[in-house]
Amino acid sequence: MRVVLQRVSQAQVSVDGEQTGAIGQGVLLLLGVSGEDTEQTADRMVDKICRLRIFPDENGKTNLSLGDVGGEILVVSQFTLYADCKKGNRPGFVKAGPPDMAERLYEYVVERCRLYADKVEHGIFGADMKVSLVNDGPFTLTLDSEELLGK
């Protein structure tokens, strides 16, 4: 599982001109699922993400978690995080999870996020989405379950 996390002051996602999700202060998660991921992988990733101290405290130090600031979460599926660009000029996506399995885990991640935030919004799996955001900082992190789980 790969995640690009962006701390945002606002973010939204739309499909065919219709907004499907929008948040204020919180995190935008661009989520890629591999063929090896499981619910246990998702649990560990979401727990880590939501406990990260990435929000500023009263002294401006990144010392507060999503829950500490009452932050919101926007989850957007992005299989292209598993692009293999080693050969040629056309990315390959063989490491991305099969659509049925990836969609199931994507939905699982959305539900798991609800344990940490009162407002969790999301895009539509597999759709052509338009994402807009105001990156707060800017503050962007990448997380990979292989590194997190020591694989």
Image (cartoon, rainbow, N blue to C red):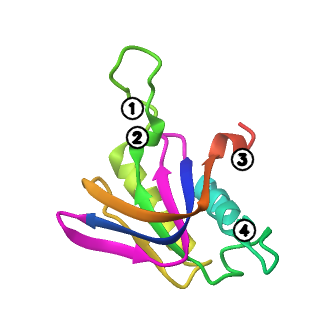
State the separation of the CA atoms marked 4 and 3: 14 Å
In magenta segment, residue 28: yes
Relative height, residue 1 to residue 95 (above, below): below
> x and y percent of residue 63 in the render?
80, 70
Q: Earlier in the sequence, mark 2 or mark 3?
A: 2
Label whose residue precedes the other's in the sequence (2 or 1): 2
Residue at the image point whose x is 75% and y is 40% from the top: 150
In the image, which disc is placed on residue 51? 4
Where residue 102 appears, x then y in whole percent? 41, 50
List the residue tagged with mark 1. Answer: 93
Task: Look at mark 2 in the image and give the residue it sits on.
Answer: 80
Q: Earlier in the sequence, mark 1 or mark 3?
A: 1
Q: Residues within 10 Å of mark 1 (few under 14, many from 20)?
A: some
Decide which of 54, 73 is in the foreground and name it. 54
Amino acid beneath label 4: Arg
Give the secondary structure at mark 1: loop
Q: Nearer the viewer, mark 4 or mark 1?
A: 4
Q: Is 18 rendered above or below residue 34? A: below
Q: Quadrant of the C terminus?
A: top right
Please state which of the two labelled residues, at mark 2 or mark 3, is closer to the viewer.
2
Rounded to the nearest angstrom, the CA distance separating label 1 from label 3 is: 22 Å
Question: Bounds of the magenta span?
Answer: 15-39
Q: Which of the two labelled residues, at mark 2 and mark 4, occupies the earlier sequence position?
A: 4
